[in-house]
Amino acid sequence: MNPTDTAAAPALPAASAGRLPRQIPFIIANEGCERFSFYGMRNILTVFLMGSLLLSIPEPLRAGASKEVFHTFVIGVYFFPLLGGWLADRFFGKYNTVLWFSVIYCAGHAMLALFENQRNGFYTGLFLIALGSGGIKPLVASFVGDQFDQSNKHWAKLVFDAFYWIINFGSFFASLLMPIFLKRYGAGVAFGIPGVLMGIATLVFWLGRRRYVHVAPAAADPHGFLAVVRTALLCPLRECAQAGTLLALFGVLLALGALAAIPALGVVAGLCLALVLVLGFGGAGAWLQMARADGVHPPEAVEGARAVLRILVVFALTTPFWSLFDQKASTWVLQGNQMLPPSWFEPTQMQALNPLLVMLLIPFNNLLLFPLLTRLGLKITALRRMGAGIALAGLAWIVVGAIQLLLDGGRPLSLAWQILPYMLLTMGEVLVSATGLEFAYSQAPAAMKGTIMSFFNLSVTVGNLWVLLANVSVKSPALTAHIATLSLSVTAFQMFFFAVFALLAALAFALYARSYREVDHYRGSAAV
């Protein structure tokens, strides 16, 4: 490990105070190329699985199998941020961790291109991409935040929006071009081009290495978040009522039940469900007994642990949004294949509408909508934006469900009918995801930046977990028979189920946001 990559950098010159950091373009360019590579392969994955790799599976089961592979892959992408965040925060720093995981990422792309006809090799490539992409995912955004201090943090909101804009710039061209390359030149070329872009992304990131602000990994803290939670939960029976500890143990028992159900749920779904149960019940138990830590840890450490638990509740309430959002690359693509596209257009290319709308909506919101709402006396907080975004996703799925009802009734529909739900879902994405990146960084204590960003990404894993569990549930003969009595197809039923799921989550989010106290954890201007 190069010491200069993790040691504190020299102080920024006084002339740079309050200015946009000059190293930001390297990170933004890296992100644009990386996102092209990721969405370039992800957005053709379902179609490739359906039309090539999974042809040996009977056709009635192939769509469901393709969705399971796709969402299992996405679960991995958003699970491995836990590993990347932990390695960066405790050992190697963000720069080194991003660089090394990027090399793994490139290797994964190479395997997709080389093993397009060999299932084990192709799945190994998907695993390496999930590991590499997931490992860097929480770190690039928090690395952007590290480049700011109190003197120039007013630039951070603009840069985070630009960061999210460039993500969608790369996604737009990937979504538009890769289906054409897949159709005309085959999977080897279609999966190879994203690999080349990932190589360029790695090179650009490396070129800026001498300009970045490098925040050193935090030393082991006896009063850190996990230490405080451990103290709160490991409460001797004679000293407290143990309600929180019993709740955490109940979560462990439920997690063991999830592991035992792996044959029915699948390995990935079972492991993720077990993790969610341990985190959920363990966090709730620690909250109930947090007073137990007051005499053992400093007050600021205990309050910091409470702040992290409050953030995790916010993240948990966004998980239904991700259930809906990520299905645009699976369920919506499969619906689009039932519709009538123009002769020059592939249904898979409809996904390009999402990043195009993001690039339009971000400046529209910042320059017109939000200033107008502010002048009208409405306070547009981060949490209010996120709650509204979850509700918009629910509305998008009501529209998609209505389209499915018409298709199930035998009515031919133009693919253009999907434009309205794409508009609603994309506005929801801008309000939830772009806002959530900056919110997660600003609310995280200094020693927990990478880890908190990992938990933000873990909310996407949990969202995709709900999709897998819903797919398992509809295979139940009893539920299938009940759906039939409603005169709905299984697909339409699931669409309306997810719409209601998101709308209820939006209501719960709004209620929780009313009592949430936002904090400011940007580093001081003297830190570098």
Image (cartoon, grey):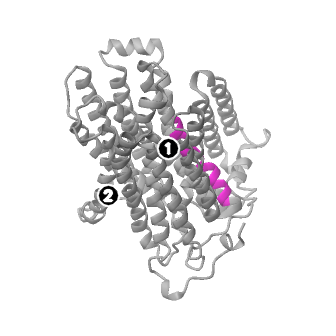
Q: Residue at x 45, y 20 (%)?
A: 61
| 189 in the magenta segment | no
- Give 52 or 302, whichever is nearer the viewer: 52
x then y, percent, for residue 291: 67, 50
Q: Looking at the figure, which quarter contains the C terminus?
A: bottom right
| Residues shaded magenta | 72-89
x then y, percent, for residue 345: 26, 41
x then y, percent, for residue 486: 31, 15
- How many neighbours does mark 1 have within 10 angstroms: few (below 14), some (14-19), or many (20 or more)? many
User: Which amino acid, by three-letter code, is at mark 2?
Assistant: Met
Task: Read off the residue under disc 2.
Answer: 359
Left or right placement of residue 446 versus residue 389 in this view: right
Snapshot quadrant of residue 284: top right
Left or right placement of residue 527 versus residue 141 in this view: right
- How many neighbours does mark 2 have within 10 angstroms: few (below 14), some (14-19), or many (20 or more)? many
Instruction: Pick out the residue farthest to the front.
Output: 185
Task: Read off the residue under disc 1.
Answer: 460
Q: Earlier in the sequence, mark 1 or mark 2?
A: 2
Q: Residue at x 59, y 62 (%)?
A: 445
Q: Residue at x 52, y 50 (%)?
A: 456
- Give 136 or 115, whichever is nearer the viewer: 115
Residue 22, compared with residue 280, is above or below; it is below
Snapshot quadrant of residue 328: top left
